[in-house]
């Protein structure tokens, strides 16, 4: 038992034993990803299954042992370390996914990596009326400039939703709302990125006003010094602000990636569809989790739980396993904050599976699916009310005490909050 614990702590050291990242460590981080790059290369080559299985332990140890060993040192950098842990776990899931498929990672229409089948009718699901086909994958400037093996490997590594790939078949892709002419597309994406930045900044600035929560050491969103009504009004506001910041943060980062992909790497605008589909408009949990919330980590959650759940209990097991895998991913990522584990995070995500089954039971019993205003209130109850202990767990471990937006460039801290303080001083004082 001691040897297993010692091995675990050799790979995942205690938070206080992590090495502060310096510029000279950049090469260490890059070298740790080389086995992962080779795994992606093999996954796009036929007859490499045994080699990929043999390579998998090296990839997992290299990624986990490196990205959990280093940390961004200093007060307020908890979210950065959360990001490092998330990056490591996503790559571990990708490595497992690449390794365990005997045929390798196939694009739609392929029977072997790089070999087209005689006929293929499968395509990615999307939100377009009439079920339009998969998004086109035209060649880019970089596809012509880079060696074929390198472009092939990078293309696989950088895809998350699986658009155009067999593992992404059936995934919802939001309908495009931007003009697809390149300059107009880039302008709209830039505006969307700035809008998301303002939302993240405003939500973070509000969270930083809450005593305890704003501390890097962490604090509960349920303030014991407040009477019951105000206590839960505040916790609900902090919860909504946290969720809005996370959602807007995904959109902001995706928009930045889109600007780089289309503007710098000459990708086609059509290859970068929206990442979110207005999650606050969801009128059932199924619509929320399967369509309107982002699908960037769908395959990650499937690898960490859905696959094994499906093997043991069929479709129901896949649903339970995927949400348990989601909980494991979120909690192991939160370990990067440096304040231990909290099982409630796993419980919240695992709870989504029976709630989804309740929706299906309702539909079969009544003949009406969950929808409309009642469905929306149901979603808000499951996510906003039942989700508060989840967000409280994160903030008790210092999530709200870290900085996403540097205070020196924060419009809310530099302009909005001082303005509101002046207004309150003039009109709010007795």
Image (cartoon, rainbow, N blue to C red):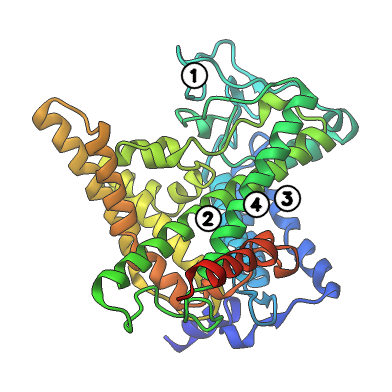
- Among the two numbered marks 4 and 3 on one chain, the one whose residue lies closer to the N terminus: 3
**Which image quarter holds the C terminus?**
bottom left
Locate residue 143, reporting x and y percent: 82, 30
Which label lies toward us, 4 or 2?
Answer: 4
How far apart marks 2 and 1 lie (CA) works out to 26 Å
**Residue underneath mark 3:** 37
Locate residue 300, reporting x and y percent: 50, 49
At label 1, counting other C-alpha atoms closer than 10 Å, the crowd grade (few under 14, some 14-19, many 20 or more) is few
Question: What kind of element bears circle 3?
Answer: helix
**Residue underneath mark 4:** 197
The image quarter containing residue 219 is: bottom left
How far apart marks 4 and 3 lie (CA) works out to 32 Å
Question: What kind of element bears circle 1?
Answer: loop
Q: Residue at x 45, y 66 (%)?
A: 331
Mark 2 vs 3: CB contact within 8 A: no
Task: Indicate whether 334 appears above or below 133.
Answer: below
**Residue underneath mark 2:** 246
Residue 51 visible within the image: no
Q: Residue at x 50, y 42 (%)?
A: 294
Q: Residue at x 36, y 35 (%)?
A: 287
Left or right of residue 332, residue 177 in this image = right
């Amino acid at each position: 038992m001691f040897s297993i614990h010692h091995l675990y702590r050799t790979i995942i050291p205690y938070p206080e034993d992590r090495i502060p990242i310096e510029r000279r460590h950049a090469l260490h981080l890059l070298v740790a990803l080389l086995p992962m790059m080779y795994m992606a290369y093999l996954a796009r080559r036929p007859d490499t299954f045994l080699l990929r299985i043999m390579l998998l332990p090296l990839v997992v140890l290299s990624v986990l042992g490196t990205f959990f060993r280093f940390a961004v040192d200093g007060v307020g950098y908890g979210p950065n370390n959360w990001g490092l842990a998330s990056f490591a776990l996503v790559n571990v899931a990708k490595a497992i996914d690449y390794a365990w498929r005997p045929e390798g990672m196939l694009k739609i229409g392929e029977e072997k990596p790089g070999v087209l089948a005689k006929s293929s009718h499968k395509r990615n699901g999307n939100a377009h009326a009439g079920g339009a086909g998969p998004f086109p994958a035209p060649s880019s400037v970089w596809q012509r400039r880079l060696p074929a093996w390198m472009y092939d490997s990078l293309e696989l590594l950088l895809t998350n939703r699986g658009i155009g790939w067999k593992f992404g078949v059936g995934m919802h892709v939001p309908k495009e709302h931007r003009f697809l002419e390149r300059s107009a597309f880039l302008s709209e994406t830039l505006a969307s990125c700035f809008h998301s930045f303002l939302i993240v900044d405003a939500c973070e600035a509000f969270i930083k006003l809450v005593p305890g929560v704003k501390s890097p050491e962490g604090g509960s969103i349920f303030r014991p010094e407040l009477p019951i009504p105000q206590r839960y009004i505040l916790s609900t506001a902090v919860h909504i602000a946290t969720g809005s910041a996370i959602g807007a943060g995904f959109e902001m980062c995706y928009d930045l990636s889109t600007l780089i992909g289309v503007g710098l790497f000459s990708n086609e605008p059509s290859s970068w569809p929206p990442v979110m589909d207005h999650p606050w408009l969801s009128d059932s949990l199924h619509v929320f989790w399967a369509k309107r919330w982002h699908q960037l980590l769908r395959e990650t959650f499937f690898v960490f739980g859905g696959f094994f759940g499906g093997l043991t209990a069929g479709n129901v097991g896949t649903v339970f396993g995927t949400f348990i895998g989601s909980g494991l991913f979120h909690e192991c990522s939160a370990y990067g904050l440096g304040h231990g584990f909290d099982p409630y995070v796993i419980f919240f995500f695992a709870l989504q599976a029976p709630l989804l089954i309740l929706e299906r039971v309702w539909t079969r019993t009544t003949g009406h699916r969950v929808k409309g205003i009642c469905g929306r209130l149901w979603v808000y109850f499951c996510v906003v009310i039942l989700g508060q202990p989840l967000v409280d767990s994160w903030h008790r471990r210092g999530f709200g005490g870290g900085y996403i937006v540097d205070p020196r460039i924060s419009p809310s801290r530099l302009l909005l909050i001082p303005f509101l303080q002046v207004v309150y001083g003039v009109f709010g004082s007795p």
